[in-house]
Amino acid sequence: MSLAEVSRATPLALANDKIALENATVTRMLEAEGILDYSGHVSTRIPGKDAFVIQIGSSSRAEVTPESMLVCDFNGKVLEGDGQPPSELPIHIEILKARPDVQSVLHSHMELAIAFTMMEGIQLVPMRARATRWKSGIPTDPDPSHIKLPEQGRALAKTLGRAKDADYLKKLKLIDEIPPPALSTYILTIYRETNLGRRINCILVLSPDTLLRSETKDNRPPASRILRSTSDVPSVHPLPSRRT
């Protein structure tokens, strides 16, 4: 679903129509990628105001339009739009309040991210060139409960800290805080998902060979890699012999 297609589907109803259009489009794109389903939501800050755009909580993520968007202030009051915001609004409010540099917040339940919050002693490391922006690590917040109180939202914002281009894993959830607006949130989420998938694959078959420091310089893909010989990889889970 492109920006143009969403725009043609429903006339814009909010004064902040461009932000509403982008938020609706990114929500539908994330749903199409399987990152959002019946739950999860994207918010985008309104420049110059203590307010942001977010979808109506009961709206299908696969069918949202700009008219499905609300404008809420940092007290959780709906300023524009007809409907109630998601119950986990404190996630967005407290992060946007604590981090003026953050312009967009995604709350999702990405399956690969959930897996890493449940494993002890396993770190997320760069496995693709575009994932080197997270090479300093991704902190994990231990609270797995439904975040619907301001104090819970403030605790999540504290976990984030002041790191640039940072995001953090919340037990059983994934929270993204990315300075560019919603479309950048989508792009970086895809980068992260592919990195998670590669990390999982390496854990299943062998000790991962992460990108070297020299290869992550300037966030450029490595010019060449020397692949580990398959003869050096132990057969951990041998396939059964084929019988005729």
Image: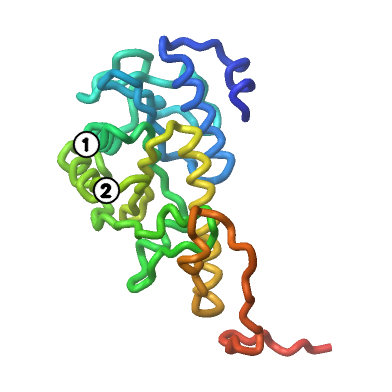
Callouts 1 and 2 close, C-beta under 8 Å: yes
Q: Amino acid at mark 2?
A: Leu
Q: Is residue 49 visible?
A: yes
Which mark sits nearer the N-terminus, 1 or 2? 1
Name the residue located 52 percent from the left edge and 74 percent from the top edge: 209
- The extreme right residue here reads 244
Name the residue located 24 percent from the left edge and 38 percent from the top edge: 148
Q: State the CA–CA distance, disc 1 to disc 2.
A: 10 Å
Q: Mark number for residue 160?
A: 2
Q: Is residue 12 left or right of residue 222?
A: left
Vertical comparison of 123 with 114: above or below:
below
Q: Quadrant of residue 116?
A: bottom left
User: Label 1: which residue?
Assistant: 98
Where, quadrant-wise, is the C terminus in this rendering?
A: bottom right
Q: Secondary structure at mark 2?
A: helix
Q: Residues within 10 Å of mark 1 (few under 14, many from 20)?
A: some
Q: Nearer the viewer, residue 17 or 224?
A: 224
Q: Is residue 37 left or right of residue 224?
A: left
Q: Secondary structure at mark 1?
A: helix
Name the residue located 54 percent from the left edge and 57 percent from the top edge: 129
Q: Is residue 193 visible?
A: no
Q: Amino acid at mark 1?
A: Ala
Q: Residues within 10 Å of mark 2 (few under 14, many from 20)?
A: many
Name the residue located 23 percent from the left edge and 35 percent from the top edge: 94
> x, y (%) of residue 141?
26, 55
> x, y (%) of residue 78?
29, 18
- The extreme left residue here reads 151
